[in-house]
Image (tube, grey):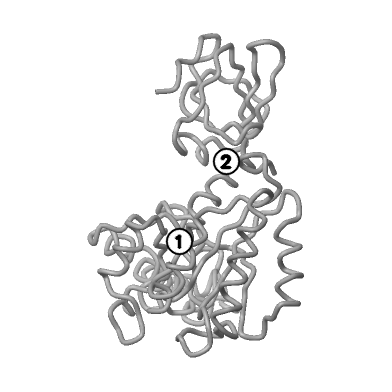
Amino acid sequence: MPVPDGKDAMLAITFDDGIKSHYDIAVPVLEKHGIKATFFVTINNIGKPGRITWEQVQDMQKRGMEIGNHAMTHAHLGKTLINTKGLNPEIDKIKIQQIQKKNHDLMLFELIAPKKIFEDHGITIRTLAFAGNSRPREAVKLTKENGMLPRVFETGYYSKDDEKSHAKKLDKILKKGNYTILMIHGVAEGTGGWSPLRNLEFFENIIADFTKHSDRLYIDTMAETSSYRERAENSTLTELKNNEYRLDLKNPDTISGAGKVTLALNGTYKVFVNGQEISMSGTFFNASTGDVIRLAPMKETAPEAP
């Protein structure tokens, strides 16, 4: 996968559970190193002892951090959703339908309802992390259908980690073409959160190490890096000859209109979706440069970027 700015690898740093120390400690450390990160917050925990307040959530967003949805009550869906395995589709049809509706209503409450509550408080929500990393397939699908990118993989840092394990993880993070989503709960022992890192110095050293490799590592919020990855994996731009390009799209719904227009290429475009040539216009991702391009209808010239 190509990485923005021609770098080797891409990283998103995420923090789970809306711990007060995320605001008091993590945000200042990140700002010191010029890093934007994503903080996943559970609605029902906002304002509770040891947790961040709505004012702090809003301030974090103003300071360039991303706020992500971490469910309404932090329910682990793998444990709370009712399993229909073992039921006979013919004999138990009504019962299965009732269970499916109950499961769907629970997912709407836990995953989708928080988005509106955040938005009512002026918080933009583009991503979601499942509580306990419990992510049933239907929950992932529902999340995407409601305009949120789910965290479906991650590399965690825990209380057991030390300099040696960090060095191994850093090597993997820096591997060419890699995209890593880093997950942290507690930033240091005694500051709150599940499985906190051993001390504040270790946390600061981790963040400093990432910035030391900024020549190779592209770091941004999960919303920005994950949307980039989706677009990159669904598009390929090939220059056929001077001012003539072929754009292959695997899933145009994923990338159409995505991102800010940063580059417009002049010339003739042949657009293919799953190998079929079509005539269309819009905004599409340029996987070869890491930019977004605006395409004019086929056989016309693309306008300059605004």
Q: Which residue corresponds to mark 1?
A: 31
Task: Give the mark, 1 or 2, whose residue is nearer the N terminus.
Answer: 1
170 sits to left or right of 106: right
> Vertical placement of 93 versus 292: above or below?
below
1 or 2: mark nearer the eye: 1
The structure residue drawn at horizontal position 65% and vertical position 43%, both measured from the top left corner, is 3
Q: Identity of the amino acid at label 1?
A: Glu
Q: Is residue 252 above or below residue 145?
A: above
Q: Which corner quadrant of the image does residue 46 belong to?
A: bottom left
Q: Residues within 10 Å of mark 1 (few under 14, many from 20)?
A: some
**SS class of the residue under badge 1?**
helix
Residue at the spot 60% in from the left edge and 22% down from the top edge: 271
Say whether residue 96 is left or right of residue 124: right
Q: In which quarter of the image is the N terminus?
A: top right
Nearest the eye: 251 or 216: 216
Q: Where is residue 5 in the image (x, y as percent from the top left)?
A: 62, 40
Q: Position of residue 76 (x, y in %)?
A: 48, 79
User: Gap between marks 1 and 2, in whole Å?
Assistant: 28 Å
Q: Percent from the top left, x then y, of residue 127?
A: 45, 58
Q: Is residue 140 left or right of residue 122?
A: right
